Image: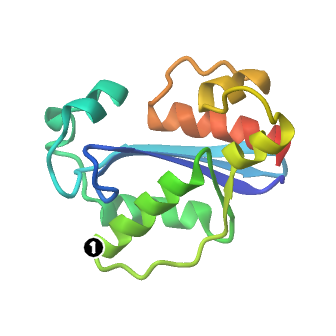
Amino acid sequence: MKDFAAIDFETANNERSSVCAVGVVIVRGGEVVDSFYSLIKPEPEYYNYWCSQVHGLCASDTDSAPVFPEVWKQIEPKIAGLPLVAHNKAFDESCLKAVFRVYQMDYPDYDFYCTCIASRKVWPKGRHTLDVIASRCGYDLTQHHHALADAEACAAIALEIL
């Protein structure tokens, strides 16, 4: 796959609609041509301890952040016509669909691919977490659970195995 948008969300709590950060990496012709990162005011707007422990974000980080529809207006033209790729598509796609529902936005049927599923086919044994698979593909993921860093790692994986 040479043309796609790798996407990663972080959530504030256990509600899939509570996206609090997004990272997107645009790949065209097998090259990274653009990237985007934004904090997002989550909906519902609260953080649980475990989510904050994973990504380090808390309410004070997103108090003045834009709401999802404002952020998506910036992302949408960048990803127009591209399939989306995520490492653990089940999570990121469900977040995207949930936040679209919360804001009563029409969800386009994005083609969505999963680097985690693909990695299980390429390497049937071992762990398939983003950091492990990124390393197998030669990418050093130093800021794991930062949405843009994770999207960059996902893009690197996709370029290797999709």
Residue 35 against residue 90 in the figure, above or below = above
| Residue under the point 30% across and 80% down | 104
Residue 33: x %, y % from top left: 70, 45
Residue 59: x %, y % from top left: 15, 37
Disc 1 marks a residue whose amino acid type is Tyr
| Residue under the point 51% across and 60% down | 93
- 56 with respect to 161 (left or right): left
| Residue under the point 66% across and 24% down | 132
**Residue tagged 1:** 103
Query: Picture quarter containing residue 89?
Result: bottom right
- 25 with respect to 138 (left or right): left
- Image quadrant in which the N terminus is located: bottom right
Residue 94 against residue 81 in the figure, above or below = above
Q: Secondary structure at mark 1?
A: loop
Number of numbered discs visible in the structure rendering: 1
Residue 128: x %, y % from top left: 66, 33
